[in-house]
Amino acid sequence: MAYPRLPRPAAQHVLRVLFAGTVLTQGIEKPADSPEPEASPLTAPAPPASRPAASPPALAPAPPAPSATAGTGQDVLQYLCSQQQEMWNSRSPMGLYFHQLNKGVHELPHQWAVALLALLIGCLCLWNGPRTWLALFTATVVGGATSLARIEAEAWGSDVVGELLLMFQAAFATGIAIQSGFDGFQVLFGTAIGFLCCYSCGEWARGLGQYVPGFAQLWYLIGTLSGGFVLTVWQQPVLVTLGPLVGGFLVSTSVECLAAKVVLAAGGSASNGPSMLPPLDIPWIDVATDLLFFTGPGALAANGGCALLAVIVYKLLDGDDRRLPAVLCLITWTLISGIIAGLFGSFWRMGASVLWVIFTALSAFRQLGMLQDWTAKSLTEIAQGWTAASIQFLMNQGPYSSIPSLRGEKSDLGKAYAPPHGLEEANHASCCFGLNR
């Protein structure tokens, strides 16, 4: 008798879920004195054994799930949750990539090295946010493109040489693209950050979207457009406020994690460490996640809103005294998070929040002093710049636009190869992005 066959990945997930559900049902409904059925190995399905006509055919006992060997309902539920996460990752390429990245960071043998790297990046952000952001953004995007190229090369079954060549091509092309158009990549980054902020605090929008179709997507669209607009008009002051905020976060979490590793190396107990330190055996990424999202998933949007509010306050006020109100706006949510952590008895989060506030306030007060002569771009200037760039791009797409006339003089030949007015300066400023831009 031929049995229908499901696709292999789908069949594995269905069988695992059914097996786990069978074990959970047996653990609840089976009497205590009934013997435990012997588990059989997972093989091809066989026809049921012959039975008398009066009795229905009996099904073969299902083998238990791998994670439910203890037979408890809690293990089965954990197994089902893990299988649901794997099924979601298999449907989402980006989810699969971030899942592998998170798993790789957790499995690194030397977590103190990760904390030291975060400490170094945090100190650079505290010193000069915009310039550090240029290097950090370039390295992050190049690293992401290289990782994606490696994953694709492994999927194709390429050899080591082909894999290295593909990774080098992806890194080189991405780095050149960022250096050639850093402002354009910042707009894309702003749209991504705006989407993440709205998604993190969009539970109400998703609930309302069940009654109003498309409302959640409209909420995400508003965040996407707002993020791109902010990093287009207020790119420089936003980087000046986000640099100290991110730097203070990295430094505070790294100090807490490194202190925990030192105590653990000195013979401290991982299960009973000091209350002012996080658990001694957890990696840095877990320390950072616990500190950032202790107050809920909307903490990312709250910190971004504080940075934007600091820029608005700095723009509306006049004089050198406007730096202090802007700094207070920037650290508002961090102060609230520290107070909440203290009320709930999480002293290490409270201590990390105090360090975060101190480092952020000192760095932001210094870096905001570099924006004394800053003026925001108007919408007219932005539209004119985009229009001029678009027209120049279309004019240069002709079939003979790059070929100079042989009948022209030497000066005309030089003019034919001369870059458009302002393009050389713009490219130089893009490569040397900083506070004086």
Image: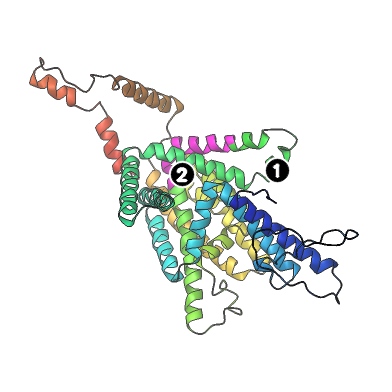
Estimate the x, y position of residue 314 in percent, counting from the top left. Answer: 48, 43
Is 345 left, or right, of 391 in this rendering? right
Query: Which element type, helix, strand or loop, lies under badge 1?
Result: helix
Question: Foreground: 35 or 261?
Answer: 35
Give the magenta-colored segment's residue range: 221-239
Estimate the x, y position of residue 179 in percent, counting from the top left. Answer: 32, 42
Question: Foreground: 52 or 287?
Answer: 52
Q: Is residue 416 visible?
A: yes
At horizontal 32% and vertical 51% (from top left) the residue drawn is 162
Circle 1 crowding by C-alpha within 10 Å: few under 14, some 14–19, many from 20: few
Is 371 left, or right, of 96 in this rendering? left
Magenta stretch holds residue 229: yes
At horizontal 41% and vertical 57% (from top left) the residue drawn is 126
At horizontal 72% and vertical 42% (from top left) the residue drawn is 207
Estimate the x, y position of residue 311 in percent, counting from the top left. Answer: 49, 43
At horizontal 49% and vertical 34% (from top left) the residue drawn is 229
Residue on which disc 1 sits: 204
**What's the distance in space between the residues labelled 2 and 1, CA to CA?**
27 Å
Q: On residue 322, which mark appears?
A: none
Disc on the earlier residue, 2 or 1? 1
Estimate the x, y position of residue 160 in percent, counting from the top left. Answer: 33, 57
Query: Which element type, helix, strand or loop, lies under badge 2?
Result: helix
Q: On residue 238, which mark appears?
A: 2
Question: Foreground: 310 or 104?
Answer: 104
Question: Please, what is the three-letter code of the amino acid marked with disc 1?
Answer: Trp
Which quadrant is home to the C terminus?
A: top left
